[in-house]
Image: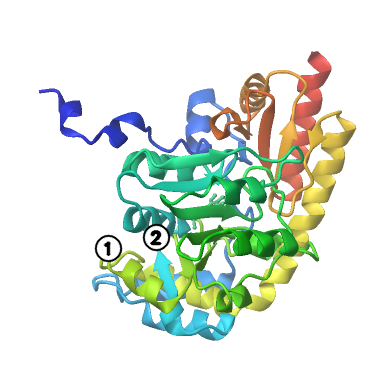
Amino acid sequence: MDFKQLFRPGILATHPYIPGKPVEEVQRELGLDDVVKLASNENPEAPLPEVVAAIIDAVRQINRYPDGSCFRLTQALAAHLEVDTDSLLFGNGSNEVIDMLIRALVSPGENVVFSAHSFIVYPLTCRAHFECGRAVPLTADDCHDLPAMAAAVDSDTKLVIVCNPNNPTGTHNSHDEFASFLAAVPGDVIVAVDEAYYEYVDAADYPQTLPMRAEYPNLVILRTFSKIHSLAGLRVGYAVGHADLIAELQKTREPFNVNSLSQAAAIACLEHWDQVAPRAQRNREQRNWLADKLDELGLAVTPSQTNFLLVRCPGNASELTRKLLQKGVIVRPMDAFGLGDGAMRISVGLAAENARCVKALEEILQDE
Ligand SMILES: Cc1ncc(COP(=O)(O)O)c(C=O)c1O
């Protein structure tokens, strides 16, 4: 039996998402005890003790299905963001929300516009759904080319995804750039701005998009508890959008898509929002330190607003990342992100992890 013939062409054309290698896998394969993972833009800090306590408390009730409507989490987030409860939709990570948008909006023959060097899930999801992705190259300084993206929109475009700040470049588009872009996109095309790294940003010209929804009802904002809040393993992300858009998207989600531990943890994160700024500050200090050291090693680092750095290497980045792996440091080569073989992405870790990465790079580059 040839199972392949049973599947839609989109499924045959795509491939599974390839994540950064898990620490245990590298330990097992290379026989190394001490491995650091700087490959998946995770927060290297553990969740807050109060968040862990909320998860443990919620464990006692996992014999019950979760609240499919995320009632308490919705109330808490709506109060925190000062938005209406019916403008919120939760997903099993913001990844699921991206999937819902593409599946719900796009019919055969229609398309989705995004950047050619951005979060890899956009093209993967488009390919699996229908071959509907339309990728627009970055500007020379590694930013989304928003005028070119607006120009790529045609009468068959249903959705444009802007990743701000962008993964894997760490760059951002300014308020003025984004406002001009919104003005240029037709009102019946949904603009999803993926702000997974929102809480890390300190650029004064970064757009505050929540208030922009009043003028642009086609704007939907995606954020996550995976990054600054250290909940990547629990998978909670959300969309903020027009109530009518959210109501339609609600129909497409699984009945219990956000599990009860995740809901309890996310509520506890919101109750301790005062910890966000110090977390972002610690990341900033480590990111600056790491960027300076990489610069001293002669590697070109793109200025970042996030918890990762895009690093251009003189030679072959896959080879360099392989050698780092041999030394127990997992980083991400960028060929899969369409950035060729001259770039790698290093997530910002704890001080000791970053020092370990720099030391390993020094040793490798000295040997060359
Ligand atoms: C730009 C961007 N969007 C979305 C996500 C997915 O986040 P989540 O864990 O909420 O699914 C990531 C994760 O790396 C990301 O980089």
Left/right of residue 7 with respect to residue 350 in the rendered view: left
Q: Quadrant of residue 193?
A: bottom right
The residue at the far front in this view is 155
Left/right of residue 169 with respect to residue 77 in the rendered view: right
Residues 82 and 317: in front is: 82
Residue 29 visible at all: yes
Q: Is residue 237 above or below residue 29?
A: below
The label on residue 187 is none
The residue at the far top in this view is 368
Q: Amino acid at mark 2?
A: Asn
Q: Tell me which numbered mark, 1 or 2, is placed earlier along the sequence.
A: 2
Left/right of residue 315 with respect to residue 263 in the rendered view: right
Q: Residue 34 location, x and y as percent?
A: 62, 36
Q: Which residue is mark 1?
A: 254
Q: Residue 287 location, x and y as percent?
A: 77, 49
Q: Residue 23 location, x and y as percent?
A: 53, 38
**Tag 1 secondary structure:** loop
Residue at mark 1 to residue at mark 2: CA–CA distance: 10 Å
Q: Is residue 267 above or below residue 101?
A: below
Q: Residue 240 location, x and y as percent?
A: 49, 72
**Tag 2 secondary structure:** loop
**Label 1 close to label 2 by CB (< 8 Å):** yes
Q: Residues within 10 Å of mark 2 (few under 14, many from 20)?
A: many
Q: Amino acid at mark 1?
A: Glu
Q: Quadrant of the N terminus?
A: top left
Q: Which residue is mark 2?
A: 92
